[in-house]
Image: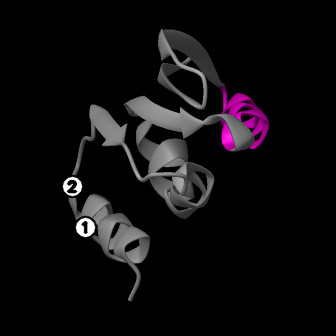
Amino acid sequence: MSIVSALQTLLKEIEKVDWIKIDVEGAEFETLKGLEDTLRKKSPRLIVEVFEQNRENVFKYMKDRGYKPKTIFSGSNRSYYFFEKI
């Protein structure tokens, strides 16, 4: 079982999820896809470290799920964003 699958299983058992922080060194898009059910059903706010090469995919994925990004910190190859459902 992958870490994301284990996390998704755990999150199904929790009634309310307010926040999720993701810092997975370049695997943020895959991690977010693995949290699809939680994003859809529980609408948590997220802080996500996004590597520049994943930015476009992460932003499109989150926008398609009703989330809007706000920049917390912008670096040359990675940035931190706050995502909240609009």
Q: How is the image coloured?
A: one colour
Q: Which residue is at a point 23% across and 49% down the rendered structure image? A: 15
Q: Is residue 74 left or right of residue 20?
A: right
Q: Residue furthest bottom?
A: 1
The magenta region covers 54-66
Which of the two residues, 40 or 3, is positioned nearer the viewer here?
A: 3
- Point out residue 60 in the picture as x, y percentages from the top left corner: 78, 35
Which of the two residues, 78 or 82, is positioned nearer the viewer here?
A: 78
In the rendered image of this protein, does residue 72 appear above or below residue 62? above
Image quarter (top left, top right, bottom left or bottom right) of the C terminus: top right
Is residue 58 in sight in this rendering? no
Identify the residue position indicated by label 1 in the image. 10
Category of crowding for the residue at label 1, using alpha-carbon neighbours closer than 10 angstroms: few (below 14), some (14–19), many (at least 20) = few
Identify the residue position indicated by label 2 in the image. 14
Q: Which residue is at a point 41% across and 81% down the rendered structure image? A: 2
Q: Secondary structure at mark 2?
A: loop
- Point out residue 7 in the picture as x, y percentages from the top left corner: 31, 66
Image quarter (top left, top right, bottom left or bottom right) of the N terminus: bottom left
The magenta stretch spans residue 70: no
Nearer to us of marks 1 and 2 is 1
Q: Is residue 23 left or right of residue 54?
A: left
In the rendered image of this protein, does residue 3 appear above or below residue 12? below
Labelled disc at residue 31:
none
